[in-house]
Image (cartoon, coloured by chain):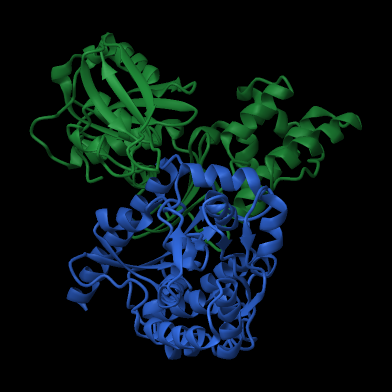
Amino acid sequence: MIVGLPKGLYYYKYHKFIEKFLDNLHISYLTSPNTNKNILNEGIRTCVDEACLPIKIFHGHVSYLRDKCDLILTPRIMKASDGEYICPKFCGLPEMIINSIPELTTITSSPLYLNDKKKIYKWCEKVGKLAGKTPSLIKESFEDALKYHANEKQGLDDEKGFSLKIALLGHLYTVYDNHLNMDVINKLHALDAGVITEECVKMIHIKSAIENLVKKPFWSNMIGTLGSGVHLAQNNLVDGIVFLSSFQCGIDSVSIDIMKDMIEDFPMLVLKLDEHSGQAGMDTRLEAFIDMLKRRKLIDLDISTHG
Amino acid sequence: MYYLGVDVGSVSTDFVLLNKNYHVIEHLYLKTNGKPIDAIKNGLSILGQTYNDKQILSVGITGSGRSVGGYILGADLVKNEITAHAVAALNIDKNVKTIIEIGGQDSKIIVLNNGIVVDFAMNTVCAAGTGSFLDRQAERMQIPIQEFGDYALKATLPLRIAGRCSVFAESDMIHKQAMGYNTPDIVAGLCDALVRNYLTNVAKGKDIQESIFFQGGVAANIGIKASFERSLGKKLYVPAHYGVMGAIGAAILSAETKKTNTSFRGFNTCLSSFNSTSLECQDCPNCCEVVTIMQDNNTLVGRFGDKCGKWSENNISASGDK
């Protein structure tokens, strides 16, 4: 039996865990390639029109794997943390896929609660059982993969060597999919700007940055992005923020405005991503933003030498 | 001796020649018509009738077509539009605080403090509040775009037109026309809609302080200017060369590079033919659309559009800090 791993959405966060788990169980797996033009086209062709680009791209990855494996992992993520919610598209992902992609092999459709270890185990157990593995081996493989995952360093934090540091924020599947975001990380590097992502900000800092809000945000995606951005900005740990946001994202529409409100005049560039492949618009915005930050730095230097 | 500045935009391709004091000696505003290379050649051929290569000290280029255009011209500087527009406005007024720039496909706000860009925003995904949209509506109503602003000023009651999406605006307008409202009122409503869209989208949360410059092709439209002034309760200043400010900025920036020898390829470049061929690179699943531009079918100008750099790395470098 071959298990298919679509390289989209939370793949970027959990692939090491699931790969380790499958390895431990001696189940072979096939990962779809990095997002490319064909996957994007296929995703847009199959998925409902109103969905956001990351969801469409996920459809493209599933479609790629459709006839190449026996089971495709399409997790129905219901919750990421206690007391928080996740974008509802995740809760309905298997239905969207089943009804959009024809001639599909078996996909997983049981709910996955990431806030509860027992429930994660239940989900994994189902996958193991589908492959005919024994409960004891599944249990052992699961515990080992979990430990392995906990020790994995996540996120990006460029060490010195760049003249500017940028907080690159957004849902992690927009941050790490180089096709979707038009290779923004390399573009920033080429403009002499290093990058830090939200995983490199400690949870305690994220929480404290947003504790004074009138109401605790309840979207998991929003807490990490907003909290890390506000923390990095208010403590001047970065020179500016680049916020990647998929067109039509409801959560971002709230996050971006609260962020603007909290960081006041701290520089932030919002890049809306959709199926564009012409790079001129992106390049102009990034180049102008970095130009601005470099020149602001010059004034700051002047002021400090006089004061 | 002159500095040449070029702005290759979606709707127009602009050329300016500045003298050593950065005064505009010559300016051209040519329609791009979707063919930026032809527009560049056209501009060179017009300027080449009066000027010669030796009079050009430096060349700067900006606009969405700047990277390809930079290779064709042999530009000394390739710069984004935000910086170019800011530099051009600062050259007129050191105290400019806000620049409202509305072009063919972009609209921008640039906020300055002490002569430095401290904040900017551009339209995110939609061209609803830009020149192309006005162009299209003017064409549909059979009003020459030059007279669009005058129509707006004749209005007795600007009608409310949905402004957040150009498709919505168009259907709203059609419905108002169908009800028999007169054209000036509809045109004025459209100007208000564009301004409303600009202020709530592009300029959202920005502090619009005087002095305010209004530039870009749409600044020609007195209806839009009036609508801005009504909404903001502040005066807008439209510089004399509002339509070519990007090109002026590019020329100034190229002068500031202080290169002793320009890499300008000369006015005769307009005699060359440029052909572009596109291919889909099959070497990896990215399937990049690579465009190859050849001069006179025998000299490679450059290749663009690849993600990995395999095709573009052999381009002779066009200057600028890109």
Residue drawn at (40%, 38%), measured in percent from left and top? Answer: B287
Task: Give residue A135's position: percent from left, percent from top.
Answer: 55, 86
Task: Give residue B94's position: percent from left, percent from top.
Answer: 34, 51
Residue B107 visible somewhere in the drawing: no
Task: Tell me: A98 left or right of B78.
Answer: right
Of residues B23 and B130, which is closer to you in this image? B130
Which chain is rendered green in the image?
B
Residue that protrudes farthest toward the left in the picture: B260
Residue drawn at (63%, 67%), measured in percent from left and top? Answer: A108
The vertical placement of B297 against B292, above or below, is: above
Task: Give residue B319's position: percent from left, percent from top.
Answer: 19, 38
- Quadrant location of the C terminus of chain A in the rendered image: bottom left
Task: Tell me: B37 left or right of A302.
Answer: right
The vertical placement of A114 against B240, above or below, is: below
Q: Colour of chain A?
A: blue
Task: Give residue B236's position: percent from left, percent from top.
Answer: 53, 46
The vertical placement of A103 against B61, above or below, is: below
Of residues A261 and A26, which is closer to you in this image? A26
Residue drawn at (33%, 71%), measured in percent from left and top? Answer: A156
Task: Tell me: B192 left or right of A279.
Answer: right
Of residues B94 and A126, which is closer to you in this image? A126
Residue drawn at (44%, 46%), measured in percent from left and top? Answer: A36
Residue B186 visible somewhere in the drawing: yes
How many numbered marks are there?
0
